[in-house]
Amino acid sequence: MHFKTIFKSLKNKDMLRRIMIILGIVVAYRLLAQIPVPMGDAATFKEAVSNLLEKSDFSNFLNLISGGGLAGFSIILVGLSPYITGSIIIQLLTKAIPRLEELSNDGESGRRKINQWTRMLTVPLAIIQSVAYIFILYQTTISANIATEFVPTAGDWVLSVTAMTAGSVILMWLGELITEQGIGNGISTIIFASIISQLPTTMASLGAALFNTSEGSLSLFGWLNLPVNPTVFWIVLGFGIALLIVIYFLVKLNEAQRIITINYAKRVHGNSSYGGIRSILPIKLIAAGVVPVIFATAFLSLPALIGQVIVSVDAGNEFGQSLITVFSAPSAGNFSTMYPDGITGQWFVYPAMYFVLVFVFTYFYTSIIFNTKEIADNLQKQGGFIEGVRPGAKTAKYLSKVVNRLDLFGALALGVIAMLPFATDYVFILATGAPQGLSISGTGLLIVVTVALENLRSIDSRALMITYDDFKNELED
């Protein structure tokens, strides 16, 4: 990274304008998270949400990517989940339907059409999720005997669902506005801001526990007492060291790439010659980035939401209860109720499915964003070739072989990162008999590190371009 160049580029009005627009959009997004859904008493529904968050992993996922919008019962309650789900569906259909695959390979115009269909699919998905969550939350207030005299009318349903759907569509629109600024992906940036926005609350609760000296203070070598809880201090210290190690390896994995040298044949046209140069084709180890983890979480958690809807209608329904049991991630919140006798075989089912889906989505998404046939055709048209490999089909086959090998290690690495919460919980269960809720969030940490690096790389590229143009203008003057 060229940090001096980045700071120098901030003097450029266009660069400063783009950054300020993105910051303004993030502020607007956080303001939306404070607007409650117009549905009865917001405090009553917040209490129902807190009960729901303890039962549903999909709810926790929504709360994560909506920046606490679910916990706050705001109009961005469903967040970007409909858009993510719509993207999964469209991309699956693109691989299954040849005509859609041809359209996706038809340059920028084809991709614009597919993106438009994704936006159109987002709206009905947002409506369905809004209706489901309002229904589940209302049934939760009744089943949990939470005091409420509010009985929603048809008008209340229409108003609340419309507000939540509009909130989801606005988030999608804000993400696209960020993407238009040319500094990172907008949807990823909003999810990044969602996770970061919850850090102050986490740090405040951690600080309160750290400076709670009711059980004693930390003694250093018997001559100095620090006003901190000794148990919490060592836990925080160990957690911080583990966090730094994980971040280090995440950065290394995200930056790792295979460099392929591209040769260009020398051509003579009249009295001039061109070509005869070398270039590189970098292939990232994890080309799919954080998308497989987000897709796997959304895809795997959806059955738990369906189970919640079924149980809300029929409390004794065995099928709905089975969906909740199988597709709920084991955590400190549900361990005592779901596993009163300790770890059983059921405890390993969710982590195993999660690992497999992350692995599969890594291969799937890489095949979408890295089209080896298209790259091979472009190289052949430009007179480029890989040494020892024939242009055309042979080059496409060679690139596919390289990408598949990288994907194998990259998918395994992503799967291991996604397993970190379950692995640390498992260690605590063996040591203390129950998870402590101190596990490193593999999904959240991976999103934060990956998006931060991608956005920083985009800023670096634009800064280099701006400073180059300024330098060129100085020379001309």
Image (cartoon, rainbow, N blue to C red):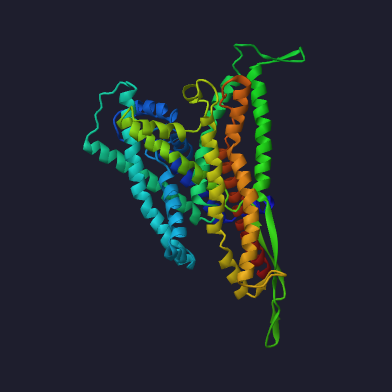
For residue 142, above or below residue 300: above
Residue drawn 24% across the image and 29% down it: 151
Whole-percent x and y of residue 365?
53, 54
Left or right: where does residue 80 sit relative to residue 451? left
Image spot of residue 234 (x, y percent) = 67, 22
Residue that lies at the very extreme toward the front in this rendered image: 345
User: 150 and 352: which one is in front?
Assistant: 352
Q: Can I make out residue 147 in this image?
A: yes
- Quarter of the rendering occupied by the C terminus: bottom right
Rendered position, 186 above or below 269: above
Q: Quadrant of residue 381?
A: bottom right
Residue 129 position within the rendered picture, expressed as x and y whole percent measured from the top left = 36, 41
Residue at x 65% of width, y 34% of height = 243
Q: Nearer the viewer, residue 331 or 408?
A: 408
Above or below for 122 versus 164: below
Quarter residue 154 falls in: top left
Q: Residue furthest bottom?
A: 270
| Residue 33 appears in view | no
Disc tally is: 0
Residue furthest left as drawn: 154
Residue 284 picture location, percent across and down: 64, 54
The one of 89 and 275 positioned closer to us in this rendering:
89
Residue 444's place in the image compared with 316, above or below, is below
